[in-house]
Image (cartoon, rainbow, N blue to C red):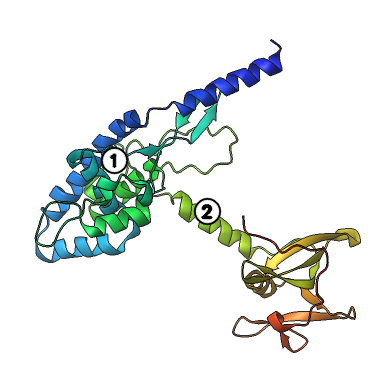
Amino acid sequence: MDTKNKARADAEKKVGDFRRVDSERVALEIAPALAAVRTLDLEVFRAGLRGADNQRYLALQRTDPQGQVVLGLVLARNADIHLPATLGLHVDRVVGDDDGYRVMPSWLTYDRLPTVVRANKRSPGSRNGTSEASHDAYRDTVGGHLVIETLLDAFAFFGRCDPTLARRAPGTDNLAHFPLPAMNTGDGYDYERRHPDQPNRADFGAEARRLTEDVPPSGSGREISYRLDSDGTAVYCRHTVERFGLRSAFTESAAQIVRDIRAGYTYVAVATDGVHHPVTVDADGCPWADGVVLEDYPFPSPTGIRSPRHG
């Protein structure tokens, strides 16, 4: 077998091995962490705090995103302890290369949980079952997220509530055992959260998108020739004027056009007679061209251009 075919065979074998990952074994390894989260929440804070301090803790948990994660993990812990059903996990995300691989489990989305778990709701006046608040918190902040991220969120929440709970590196204020060892993602581009104080993947992605949106496009400006419909939303397209007179196609939303113009970038609307009208933005954030709101500007009807679809 030549080198290329051997490498392909090895890769296919590894993929097959990944598909046979035992999610129940992964769940068993997570169980002690869930028990620790529940003990801190129930015994240390809920039962340990009195009066106004107790009410402040409960109020923070109801409103804080990381507190909601703690509340959502109660559902996972209760299913593990009290119900005859295994709370499955997604174990199809594997990172690494020939030096080693790591399975990155994530929680099932709420609608994919076993029926017995979703039906296990506390009745009024009863202490049996899981509270509706925990069901909602799981649905909103736990389901679909990486297990490691939810545990780091819980760690961060408890650390903010009582910083003395966490062990520190000797002689420092740094958390012991953090940052976590780097995982090998293979391509080197995947975001990896390794510390409770770091943002989770969703927040990191949102910030990356915000920074991208705030950076104006390349080129000296853009010429808008058409308005298209993309799933009920108007988008604008045609050419970006690049260096040396080159042109590249673009498609952009009105909101992004407004951000670009406010950052100093130039857009012009191209009329049917070829005249260029500068696009401006008013105090209310509405784009205009030639005295007409951009969404009403009489662009020519596009021919041979398909409306974009969101992927």
Residue type at numbered disc 2:
Gly
Quarter of the rendering containing residue 62 = bottom left
Question: What residue sits right under mark 1 in the picture?
Answer: 168
Residue at 25 percent of width and 41 percent of height: 34
Say if residue 99 shows up in the picture: no
Question: What residue sits right under mark 2 in the picture?
Answer: 205
Residue 152 x, y percent position in the rendering: 35, 45
Quadrant where the image shows the C terminus:
bottom right
Q: Nearer the viewer, residue 167 or 248?
A: 248
Position of residue 46 relative to residue 76, above or below, is below
Secondary structure under badge 1? Answer: loop
Horizontal relation, residue 254 to residue 178: left or right: right
Residue 64 x, y percent position in the rendering: 31, 61
Say if residue 47 shows up in the picture: yes
Residue found at the far front of this picture: 115
Residue 234 x, y percent position in the rendering: 66, 72
Residue 187 x, y percent position in the rendering: 60, 35
Residue type at numbered disc 1:
Arg
Quarter of the rendering containing residue 52 = bottom left
Residue at 17 percent of width and 51 percent of height: 129
Number of labelled discs?
2
> Mark 2 or mark 1: which is in front?
2
